[in-house]
């Protein structure tokens, strides 16, 4: 999660995404569409993040007129997303916020997690955890935190071994790399 300081007084990506997703989430809950919208936001993000796709750039850079951006958006997502979600994306284009589409998914996921009482935990590992390791880690963290856990693994090839966990913004670093750094610090100052 990146925190940005806004020098110009303009809201950052997280603030903008949060505003739109709070409104969307409220509507989705009222209509029983919260899970469906999460799936559709996943699809939108996947399409925009595709390596060979220039769609994201076309919807955020101003290379196309607003009218053409809207036509493109409607053409790409016409049958795959709910009209309420499509209307929100069109509204975002109207407000010049097309560049924030990919920020919607994590903001919406946070709202879903809060509602369900799920704690997102990111585990940085040198290689993917096997099934048993993942189950064990999830159970251990859930027991410590007293909440249900949604574990996300991030592979960090610079780690020698061990794990680094991020839980509610706090870093718990049990990696060998960090232990070696601490040892080096102690040797320098002792």
Image: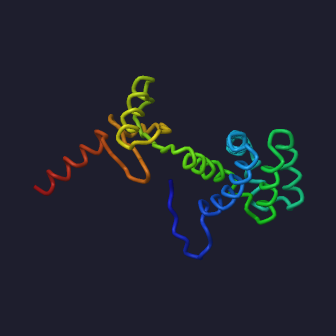
Q: Nearer the viewer, residue 145 or 186?
A: 145
What residue is rendered at 60% in x and 46% in y? 112
Q: Nearer the viewer, residue 76 or 36?
A: 36
Q: Nearer the viewer, residue 173 or 177?
A: 173
What residue is rendered at 22% in x and 49% in y? 182
What residue is rendered at 81% in x and 39% in y? 80
The percent coordinates of residue 130 (x first, y second) are: 43, 24
Position of 92 compared to 159: left or right?
A: right
Quarter of the rendering containing residue 41: top right
The percent coordinates of residue 172 (x first, y second) are: 34, 47
The residue most toward the left is 190
The residue most toward the front is 30
Image quadrant occupied by the C terminus: bottom left
Q: Nearer the viewer, residue 66 or 79?
A: 79
Q: Is residue 175 above or below residue 73?
A: above
Quarter of the rendering containing residue 92: bottom right
Position of 29 compared to 113: left or right?
A: right
Position of 110 compared to 184: left or right?
A: right
The percent coordinates of residue 185 (x first, y second) are: 20, 53
The percent coordinates of residue 57 (x first, y second) are: 74, 53
């Amino acid at each position: 999660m990146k925190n940005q300081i806004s020098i110009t007084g303009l809201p950052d990506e997280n603030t903008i995404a949060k505003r739109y997703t709070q409104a969307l989430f409220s509507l989705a809950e009222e209509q029983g569409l919260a899970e469906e919208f999460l799936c559709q936001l996943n699809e939108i993000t996947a399409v925009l993040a595709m390596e060979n796709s220039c769609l994201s750039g076309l919807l955020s850079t101003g290379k196309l007129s607003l009218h053409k951006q809207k036509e493109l958006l409607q053409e790409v997502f016409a049958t795959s997303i709910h009209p309420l979600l499509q209307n929100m994306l069109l509204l975002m284009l109207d407000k010049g916020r097309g560049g924030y589409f990919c920020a919607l998914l994590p903001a919406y996921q946070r709202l879903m997690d809060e509602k369900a009482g799920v704690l997102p935990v990111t585990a940085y590992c040198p290689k993917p955890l096997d099934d048993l390791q993942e189950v064990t880690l999830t159970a251990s963290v859930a027991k410590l935190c007293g909440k249900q856990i949604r574990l996300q693994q991030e592979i960090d090839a610079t780690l020698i071994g061990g794990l680094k966990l991020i839980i509610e913004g706090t870093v718990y670093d049990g990696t060998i790399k960090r232990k070696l750094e601490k040892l080096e610090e102690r040797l320098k100052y002792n």
